[in-house]
Amino acid sequence: MTHSSMRRYLGGSRLLPPGFILLVGLAGCSTGSPPAQEPDRLVIPLHWSAASNAILIPSISLTDWWQQFNDPLLTTLITQALRTNTSVRSAQAALQQARALRDVGAAGLSPSLSASGSAQRGKSGGIDASSSLRTGLDARWEIDVFGARRSSLDAFEADAQAFQASLADVQVSIAAEVALAYIQLRGQQAQLQIARNNLASQQETLQITDWRLQAGLTTALELEQARTATEQTSAQLPTLQTSIRQTRLSLALLSGQTPDTLQVLVTEPQPIPEITGDWALGIPAQTLRQRPDVRAAEQRIRAALSRVSAADAARYPGFALSGSLGLSALSMSGPTGGASVVSALLGSITVPLLDGGAALAQVRAQEAALEQARVAYEAVVLTALKDVESALMALQGDRARQFHLQNAATAAANAALLAQQRYASGLIDFQTVLQTQRTLLTAQDSMASTQAAISTDHVRLVKALGGGWN
């Protein structure tokens, strides 16, 4: 505020003496800290180094990305989690608190008005009792000349925006965690089914070996080898079943349900959910704008900037207008009987003179907090870039691995079937059968793991892109 505008602002009031206005002008001449500037922008790459043409195809919506898996149960679980998960509800409460504090700050910019009233009746010795009645209105307005209160309100508003972005970040994380747990569960169920199928095949081979031993066509060594392979595969079943139960517990916690309720929903094995499309990637800067954690970090910088301004403005004089209007009566019958009107109007100024450097130290403290917010913003941006690049690399690698594992699983299945048939005819030895069965189990298990990994990569990619919130 310039000196001339300050005179126009204050000089028109008959309540303020010329010395008061002069004092304000002198305070306005004092040197303040230079206004804090926005942080320098990081150098954002123009494209993703891990992106490929196979990924950059027409986009699908990132808001409700889980629907692209075409799994109604997955959609139900994520919807339930976004409504009842404790982390989401805690973030919602934090947002409500931040908005309430913003409203408190906004109220401080307006005049305050309060009403008061009192009644008194007293008697001393033999003197007749006396009564008095007083009612009144009190008003006060702290004039925000240098913008300290406005800057504080801006900080509260930025805090509220940061908490809103943090809520979105929690929603993105919870939706992704539910999907990851669900995909892991379906992958474990697929591995359990593969182990059971291979166990059935090995038990059939064990029966054939037993028959051949009774016919004198083989030795007890081959029978024991067949029994060993069967027992080893059987030993995998309890481990997989335990893993399934543990994953089910994690999924129940994430989705805000009790374990017994969820068990009914996911007991029956279902295929591993697969994405029906790809995520189209724009330039990295667009990704950063849609990530809620980056937006939250930006709002925290805004809040820190506003607090620096508020701390700097607190070094200058403070102005206030206050007044009261009341009625005073000497009769309890009401204010109309002999009542008198009492009014007062006061203008005041508070000038900091000697504070031992506390005000300047407070400015430096807020500037340090601003620097922390800037560094935190840079860390969030770098993490966002790393998350997307890592998810892209993992997706490309698992896709290439899936292609070769699919061919290997097909060849292993054919080899195991041929080996079993030829062994039953006495054309090959038992070691060949064992080797083909082990290879088949490994190839099928790896294939199921890779299918789950690809779906997991899609979830991690969409989380890195900031999908899952409006």
Image (cartoon, rainbow, N blue to C red):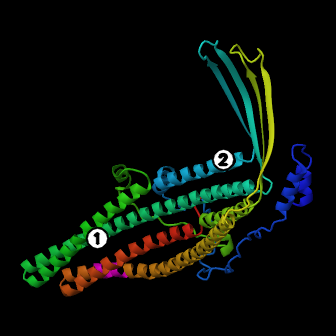
Rate crowding at label 2 as few (under 14), some (14 to 19) or many (20 or more) other CA atoms within 10 Å.
Answer: few
Locate residue 260 relative to residue 138 in the image: left or right: left
What secondary structure do most residues of the magenta stretch adopt? helix
Question: x, y percentage for residue 176?
Answer: 50, 63
The residue that label 1 is drawn on is: 195
Locate residue 300 relative to residue 408 in the image: left or right: right
- The residue nearer to you, when weighing 222 against 457, is 457
Question: x, y percentage for residue 25?
Answer: 87, 59
Mark 2 lies on a secondary structure that is: helix
Q: Nearer the viewer, mark 1 or mark 2?
A: 2
Residue at point 49% right, 81% down?
397
Quarter where residue 468 is shown: bottom right
The mark that comes first in sequence, 1 or 2, is 2
- The residue nearer to you, when weighing 97 against 208, is 97
Quarter the C terminus occupies? bottom right
Please indicate, yes or no, whether residue 413 appears anywhere in the rendered image: yes
Find the magenta span and give its range: 411-417
Q: Which mark is residue 104?
A: 2
